[in-house]
Amino acid sequence: MNFSIVTPSFRNSKWLKLCIPSVADQEGVSLEHIVQDSCSDDGTQDWLPHDTRVRAFIEKDKGMYDAVNRGYQRAQGEILTYLNCDEQYLPGALKAVYDYFQAHPKVDVVLSDTVVVDTNGDYICHRPSLVPLKNHIWIRFSVLTCAVFIRRRTVQDFGLYFDTKWRDLGDMFWLLELVNRGVSVGVLRHFTSAFTETGENMNLKPNALREKAEKIQMTPAWVKTLSPLIIQYHRLRMLASGAYSQKPFDYALYSFASPNQRIVHHVTKPTALWRGRY
């Protein structure tokens, strides 16, 4: 099996119903979609166990990252990734990622590009992935997790599971550990994923803000001092990646208005500026 996709779920039934078909319609690869639901009481349990497109595990967990860890431990695919309920894969995404891994056998992790959309699936901006730099991670998180793919053997050999101490910033510390271990990272300049700005994303909630304050306390003093330069360097890397010169493009998503068929969206004026975030 080529891919194991893990989706942590808790009271996200309406979004999960859009996420699942975006995985199920991927062509040219073999995959399993593991949904780790933490005993949702929003109607998820009424339909999820009967959805033959997924392997559903309904059990209490200690938060999102514990759910992802459980899914990774159950996974059988060569390549692991996790996709939140309010995220989707774009058509042909996994085939493009698989082909990249096949062409670069020494690469352990592949990062790709993401389209950021609103709750209707309309375009907000796009975010290219950048190879993470150790000390820069404290200031700028250069990827979205829906565009991170890692070989299962790398997770197992290095014990690269998420630290469940964190409820919201586990991604950042996982990526920092990945860099510290010297894992080989490649970048695929291809839009594979869509991240939905729902207004209720976990990283905007009070616990995330508390963890961000704790992260600031942990940030090395010299990194804080040089943060303006790190931010400028990040912008230069974005420029070099082509983020600010993206040509018009199309993408296709499932939506509440069209849950059974992807709708094509045309982007005439691309922007890499995520207003309100950076």
Image (cartoon, rainbow, N blue to C red):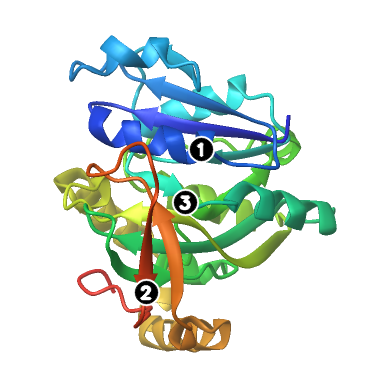
Q: Is 93 left or right of 103, judged from the image as shown?
A: left
Q: Position of residue 31 (x, y in %)?
A: 64, 31
- What's the CA distance linking mark 3 and mark 1? 15 Å
Q: Secondary structure at mark 1?
A: helix
Q: Is residue 123 visible?
A: yes
Comparing labels 1 and 2, the label whose residue is closer to the camera: 2
Relative height, residue 136 to residue 71 (above, below):
below
- Residue at point 43%, 32% (across, down): 20
Residue at label 2?
267
- What's the CA distance linking mark 2 and mark 3? 23 Å
In the figure, residue 153 lies in which quadrant? top right
Q: Secondary structure at mark 2?
A: strand
Residue at label 1?
23
Q: Earlier in the sequence, mark 3 or mark 1?
A: 1
- The one of 64 and 5 positioned closer to us in this rendering: 5
> Which label belongs to residue 145?
3
- What's the CA distance linking mark 1 and mark 2? 23 Å
Relative height, residue 55 to residue 4 (above, below):
above
In the figure, residue 45 lies in which quadrant? top left
| Screen quadrant of the N terminus | top right
- Residue at point 46%, 62% (across, down): 114
Q: Residues within 10 Å of mark 1 (few under 14, many from 20)?
A: many
Q: Residues within 10 Å of mark 3 (few under 14, many from 20)?
A: many
Q: Are marks 1 and 2 in contact (CB under 8 Å)?
A: no
- Residue at point 52%, 33% (across, down): 24
